[in-house]
Image: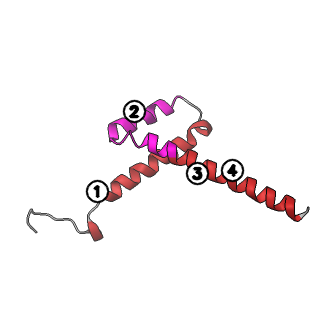
Amino acid sequence: MSMASRVFSWRCRRAVRVLEMRRRRELETDLGAHATGRDRADLLALLDQYDDAQTAEVRDILMRQQVREERRRRPVAGFAVTRPGW
């Protein structure tokens, strides 16, 4: 394989990766509109009607968003304030 063909191949793979990252980012943004737990549950119920292989990426994004949301709610350093003003 010549150097020119290696460079061309590398550029093609890089372009595909960039496009895939953009597509994934846009999908995450679109699914971010389902921010509430109820919306997310409705969407997961809808996805249950389809094959897992077809919906794996969407399910992964939804679960990551749910985990991220739960981490935001968790108190810092694991300390919970038991009474107001503490």
Percent of width and height locating residue 28: 48, 45
- Circle 1 sits on which residue? 73
**Dividing the picture into quarters, in which one does residue 51 lie?**
top right
The type of residue carrying mark 3 is Met
Q: Name the residue beneath numbered marker 4.
A: 16
Residue 25: % across, % down? 51, 48
* Residue located beneath label 3 in the image: 21
- Are circles 4 and 1 on residues that touch, CB within 8 Å? no
- 4 or 1: mark nearer the eye: 4
Q: Which residue is mark 2?
A: 42
Give residue 5's quadrant in the image.
Answer: bottom right
Q: Element type at marker 4?
A: helix
Query: Foreground mark, 1 or 3?
Result: 3
The crowd level at tag 2 (other Cα within 10 Å; few <14, some 14-19, many 20+) is few
Mark 2 vs mark 3: give the one in front.
3
Q: Is residue 60 left or right of residue 68?
A: right
Residue 27 is a magenta residue: yes
Extreme residue toward the bottom, this view:
77
**Residue type for callout 1:** Arg
Amino acid tagged 2: Asp
The first of marks 4 and 1 along the sequence is: 4
Ranked by sequence position, the earlier of labels 1 and 2 is 2
Q: Residue furthest left?
A: 85
Sequence order check: which comes first, mark 2 or mark 3?
3
- Which sits earlier in the primary sequence, circle 4 or circle 2? 4
Query: Of residues 18 and 33, which is closer to you in this image?
Result: 18
Task: Measure how far apart labels 1 and 2 are at the Cα level.
Answer: 22 Å
Q: Quadrant of residue 30?
A: top left
**Is disc 2 in contact with disc 3, using a CB cutoff of under 8 Å?**
no
- What is the spatial separation of the Cα atoms under label 3 and label 4, in whole angstroms? 9 Å
Foreground: disc 4 or disc 2: 4
Q: CA distance from mark 2 to mark 3?
A: 26 Å
